[in-house]
Amino acid sequence: PRNEMETVLHFATAVSSGRMEDAMTMVHPDCKWTYAGPDELSFTGEYFGREGVMRFLRTFGEQFEIVDFTPQMKWDGDTIILTVKEISRCRATGHEGEIAVTQTYTVRFGQIIEFREVADTASLFSLTRE
């Protein structure tokens, strides 16, 4: 990748196509990965390093499938902010819904050094209910 935006796009494309090893080359070994939300969602919290990011992606992916992901992107220096309209499906119930998401990536030297996501976790959690 030639710049911060390309780093984030390369990461997202690799994750969405299942190329996790490729995606992890975009993640700094000391990355801090934060997904804000209630304890009822097992993937919320802070994760550290590539292993932590993999654990987050695996835990999220076991519970939810992202059906559609439509981002609006803003780029300011080493920070990329994605405001996303996401359609997610709960694997256990099959329920689907639109989730408002904001993702903030900090990229330095071609790797993601920090990630923070704030999502409508109440709507996401409601998909887990029968």
Image (cartoon, rainbow, N blue to C red):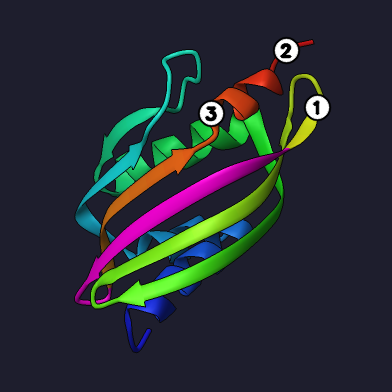
Q: Amino acid at mark 2?
A: Arg
Residue at left offset 19%, top offset 76%: 109
Residue at left offset 46%, top offset 65%: 11
Q: Amino acid at mark 1?
A: His
State the SS at label 1: loop
On the image, numbered disc 1 is attached to which residue? 95
Where's residue 90, x and y in %? 72, 28
Q: Can the viewer see residue 18 in this picture?
A: no
With 17 as the anchor, is 120 left or right in this view? left
Q: Can the viewer see residue 82 in this picture?
A: yes
With 40 as the anchor, is 71 left or right in this view? right
Residue 124 position (above or below residue 108)? above
Where's residue 87, x and y in %? 72, 45
Task: Determine whether label 3 and label 1 are within 8 Å by CB.
Answer: no
Residue at left offset 34%, top offset 47%: 116
Crowding at dot 1, Cα within 10 Å, few <14 / some 14-19 / many 20+, comes out as some
Q: Any magenta on residue 61?
A: no
Indicate the quadrant containing the N terminus: top left, top right, bottom left or bottom right: bottom left
**Foreground tag (3 vs 1):** 3
Indicate the quadrant containing the C terminus: top left, top right, bottom left or bottom right: top right
On the image, numbered disc 3 is attached to which residue? 121
Residue at left offset 33%, top offset 84%: 3
Seen from the viewer's position, the closer of residues 76 and 9 is: 76
On the image, numbered disc 2 is attached to which residue? 129
State the SS at label 3: helix
